[in-house]
C-alpha cells in the first residue's frame, strides 16, 4: 500500500488474539516514542470491537503513562465495565513488553432525540481550506527543500494539514502571539464507510497539532526545538457523526501553561460550522 490513508486504516485494523485482547502494530519510526494519537486510536478500535456496533462512542478519557517503543507491537486488553440500556462503557489498557504504557475509558451511547439543541459558533472566521497551502508547501517555500527526515514524514502523513494562520519562523514573529492555532485537516484518501474507523482516525489526528497552541507564544512551530514535549492525558467528546476524510477545522487554544505543563483545548467543526468534537489535552514541557 502506498496511500498513507490506506496505511492508517491498516494500522487501525487490530488483530484479535483473545475475546477481549487485541494486538496492534507499531511502525518502526525515527521517533523517540510511539505517536500518542496512534495508541489512542488503536485503543478506541479495541473498545469498539467489543460492542455490538449500534452505539457510537460519545466520549473518551485517556492517560499516557509511559512512552511506547516504535517497532514493538502493543497489546490492548479490554475490560467490559458496563452494558446498560443506553450506555456501554469499556476500559482499555495498552501493554508493551509487559509494561502498561496507556489506558483509556470510552463510553458509547445509543443515539436518541434530545429535548433541545444549541452550540456556540466558531470563534472566528478562517480562510477556506482549498485557498490555503499545505503545511508541506509552506515549509518548502520557506526552506527551499525539506530536510530528508521531514520529507519522509511528509510522504507518510495520512492527513492533509493546512494552517489557517501563517506559520511563524523566528523569535520576532512569535512576540506577542496569542496561544491559539487553527488548522484544516482531512485524510489524504478515502477511509471507507465504517463509522468506527472515522472516529478512530480523527482520534489519531486530534493529537497531531493540539499542543501547538501552547508553544505558539514561546517558539516557532517549524524550526529548532527549544522544548521537549509529551502528551500527558487526552479527553474527547463526540457530538455529531462525521467523516475524517472530509475537511474539518481544528480550532485550538491554550488557556494556561505553568509548572512545566500546558493545557490545550480544541473544537472541531465541519465546513458548515457545526461543532463535531470537543478535545482537551495537557502536555508536559521541559527545556532541552
Image (spheres, rainbow, N blue to C red):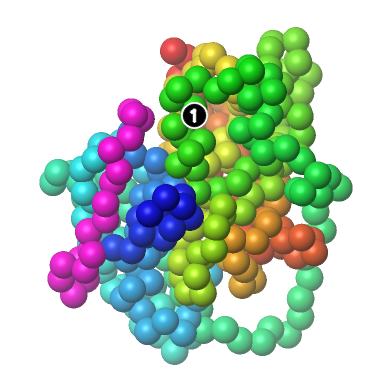
Q: Which residues are magenta?
A: 15-32
Q: How many marks?
A: 1
**In the rendered image, is residue 60 in sight?**
no
Residue 29 forms part of the magenta stretch: yes
Residue 63 percent location from the top left of the image: 39, 47
Residue at x-position 14% and y-position 44%: 97
Q: Residues within 10 Å of mark 1 (few under 14, many from 20)?
A: some
Residue 24 percent location from the top left of the image: 26, 56
Task: Judge whether 225 appears above or below 121 on screen.
Answer: above
Residue 228 percent location from the top left of the image: 45, 22
Residue 150 percent location from the top left of the image: 49, 27
Task: Judge whether 52 appears above or below 78 on screen.
Answer: below
Residue at x-position 75% and y-position 65%: 274
Circle 1 residue: 151
Q: Quadrant of residue 190?
A: bottom right
Q: Is residue 142 left or right of residue 80?
A: right
From the viewer's side, name the closer residue of 27 and 279. 27
Residue 78 forms part of the magenta stretch: no
Amino acid at each position: 500500500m502506498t496511500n498513507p490513508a490506506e496505511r492508517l486504516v491498516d494500522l487501525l485494523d487490530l488483530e484479535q488474539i483473545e475475546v477481549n485482547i487485541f494486538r496492534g502494530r507499531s511502525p518502526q519510526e525515527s521517533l523517540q516514542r510511539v505517536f500518542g494519537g496512534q495508541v489512542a486510536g488503536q485503543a478506541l478500535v479495541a473498545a469498539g470491537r467489543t460492542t455490538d456496533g449500534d452505539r457510537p462512542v460519545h466520549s473518551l478519557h485517556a492517560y499516557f503513562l509511559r512512552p511506547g517503543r516504535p517497532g514493538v507491537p502493543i497489546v490492548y486488553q479490554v475490560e467490559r465495565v458496563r452494558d446498560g440500556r443506553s450506555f456501554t462503557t469499556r476500559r482499555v489498557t495498552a501493554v508493551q513488553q509487559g509494561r502498561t504504557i496507556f489506558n483509556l475509558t470510552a463510553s458509547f451511547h445509543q443515539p436518541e432525540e434530545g429535548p433541545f439543541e444549541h452550540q456556540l459558533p466558531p470563534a472566528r472566521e478562517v480562510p477556506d481550506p482549498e485557498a490555503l497551502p499545505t503545511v508541506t508547501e509552506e515549509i518548502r517555500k520557506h526552506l527551499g527543500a525539506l530536510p530528508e527526515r521531514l520529507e519522509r514524514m511528509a510522504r507518510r502523513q495520512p492527513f492533509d494539514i493546512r494552517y489557517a494562520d501563517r506559520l511563524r519562523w523566528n523569535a520576532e514573529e512569535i512576540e506577542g502571539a496569542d496561544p491559539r492555532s487553527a488548522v484544516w485537516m482531512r485524510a489524504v484518501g478515502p477511509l471507507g464507510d465504517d463509522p468506527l474507523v472515522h472516529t478512530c482516525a480523527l482520534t489519531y489526528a486530534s493529537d497531531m497539532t493540539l499542543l501547538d497552541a501552547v508553544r505558539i507564544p514561546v517558539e516557532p512551530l517549524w524550526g529548532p526545538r527549544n522544548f521537549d514535549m509529551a502528551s500527558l492525558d487526552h479527553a474527547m467528546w463526540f457530538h455529531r457523526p462525521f467523516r475524517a476524510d472530509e475537511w474539518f477545522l481544528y480550532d485550538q487554544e491554550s488557556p494556561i501553561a505553568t509548572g512545566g505543563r500546558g493545557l490545550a483545548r480544541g473544537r472541531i467543526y465541519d465546513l458548515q460550522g457545526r461543532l463535531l468534537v470537543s478535545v482537551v489535552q495537557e502536555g508536559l514541557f521541559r527545556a532541552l
